[in-house]
Amino acid sequence: MIAPIVALAIAALVPLVVRNEYYLQILTQAYVFAISACGLNVILGLAGQLSLAHSAFFGIGAYAVALLATKAGVPFWFGLPAGVLLCSAAGYVIGSICLRSRGHYFAIFTLAVGIIIHLVIQKWESLTHGHIGVIGIPGPGPLGPLTFDSSVARSYLALFFLALTVAATARLMRSPIGRTLMAVRESEALAGAVGLDVMAAKRMAFTISVALAGLAGGLFAGFIGFLGPESANVEMTFNTLLYVMVGGMGSLSGPVAGTFIVYGLSQVLAVLQHYQMVIFGLALVLLIRFMPSGLAGAWRSR
Amino acid sequence: MTLLETRGLSKSFGGLRAVDGVDFSVTAGSLTGIIGPNGAGKTTLFNLISRALPATSGQIVFDGRDVTRLQSHQVARRGMGRTFQATTLFADATTLENVLVGYRQRTTSGLFDAMVRSGRLAREEREAEAAARESLKSADLAQVADRPAKSLTQEQQKRLAMAVALVSRPKMLLLDEPFAGINANQSRGLIALIESIAATGITILLIEHQMQVVMQLCRRIMVLDYGKKIAEGTPQEIRTDPAVLDAYLGGHA
């Protein structure tokens, strides 16, 4: 119980010390991507299903906020829950179909679904402006006395949502539902034989997972102010997957730590442009060889 | 009173009739054995009854209801527990967690309860843990409750698989080769456990290869060969049945 409070306290102090605008923006984005990574961890780490459609739902959440605000004048604070709801509904329906397949087939199926959603966003120019993207997305407006115009305030807002995500995931993991997902991950045959509705459990995990992706996407759109279809592409999914794997699938804090390490490193190595993938590729191979359960796994078995 | 009945139950895999028109019934409270040579369709029959596999044709009636079209978890919730031939457990979870999962079907807390940590959740968690500890005690596993299931001995794993199936208090328990891979000494303990389960009134149907064990445990035996029921009766009747001798000794038809 101590470790998360210490981590939260340190995180809360950082913006008071680091006053550099650029670093604060990177920090805020790391929080947002960590929320998405926590979401992927629910379906991948807890339920054991590799979904490769994850960033497509990040895109749906982001575009929902962006388009509701720019086309219909819906404020961020209404657009964000609307985006999360839209993602959940889409996730429930798409999950019901995709989850009929298992293992590699599920991964391939969701990869295709992710590509299709990305293409729809990219090609539906009358709605999304295609490659040009959406510009001038209004950020979060004031909530009572709280305003979110400064980078510091926005970083705190992102941190708040991340803390909420981690707390909710912790409760999920330590509940009978967490055990049900563990059962589904370890043996679907036995889970069914002891009376667990395997399909319903996987569908719930998928829906929660994409709802968190949508939340992250919505925050991303509101904070950055502009949005292009690349926010929903497959590369984003694989980045998120890297965060989760480096941190440790199925652990609570692993995906958050993984996001900070990999995303932080990718900012440091940004000068290398695409060549940084050579470094990440090698690092991933070494990681899977020597730390298959990620940093969290290595920490537990130290 | 009949607890389970199959009528013309069949399963085809491509051209192979793995289970072929089996009419079979199990009396409530009985301890029945299914025997037959390798590949006779015993495990397939279990998978059909527990709805792990869809039947090609025929009907399954369990506890007075047609369950032929239900899913496996729905049949399980009506009171049918089972174990698997290759002992199947949630390997990385602890012994206690394995049994807790077995109890989950009797609780109703959902996502909302987990998020707000409702009173119902707390009550059901206490109830589940009490039932799980009780179940571990009767399977003589209380002392390994916090060990990962994969670290238990083969024989302990078999008892744990039974405890997982029994914690929800099913009406019927299907045991798929409970004695496979354990020595004669350990078999005695397992026989005693199965007899004590039967003594509580739970109907048991078991598949077994070792003839002497089946003869000792079961009052009724059904013999499968090439997917068909070739004999049914008491151990004495089965021992002298010409069709059974033929199937096992490979005599000429």
Image (cartoon, grey):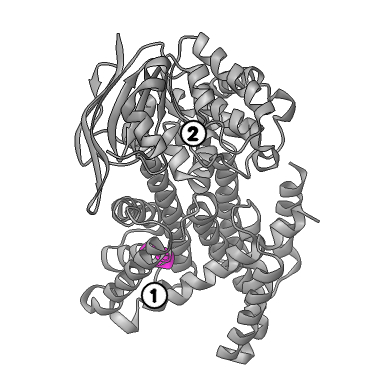
User: For the residue carrying disc 1, how many other residues have a C-alpha within 10 Å: few (<14), some (14-19), or many (20+)?
Assistant: some
Do tag 1 and tag 2 residues touch (Cβ < 8 Å)?
Answer: no
Dot 1 and dot 2 within a common chain: no
Where's residue A100, x and y in %? 32, 53
Where's residue B152, x and y in %? 69, 37
Residue B20, by quadrant, is: top left
Q: Which stretch appears magenta?
A: A52-60
Where's residue A84, x and y in %? 39, 54
Where disc 2 sits, the SS reads loop
Q: Nearer the viewer, mark 1 or mark 2?
A: 2
Q: Amino acid at mark 2?
A: His
Q: Which mark is residue A106?
A: none
Where disc 1 sits, the SS reads loop
Residue sitting at the far front? B252
Please say if A85 is above or below B116.
below
Residue at x-position 68% and y-position 75%: A286
User: For the residue carrying disc 2, how many other residues have a C-alpha within 10 Å: few (<14), some (14-19), or many (20+)?
Assistant: some
Q: Amino acid at mark 1?
A: Gly
- Rendered-image quadrant of the N terminus of chain A: top right
Question: Which chain does the numbered disc 2 sit on?
Answer: B
Q: Is residue A17 left or right of residue A141?
A: right
Q: Is residue A125 left or right of residue A165?
A: left
Q: Nearer the viewer, residue A51 or B171?
A: B171
Where's residue A268, x and y in %? 68, 82
Residue A119, by quadrant, is: bottom left
Q: CA distance from mark 1 to mark 2?
A: 73 Å
Q: Which mark is residue B209?
A: 2
Q: Nearer the viewer, residue B203 or A118?
A: B203
Residue with the mark numbered 1: A136
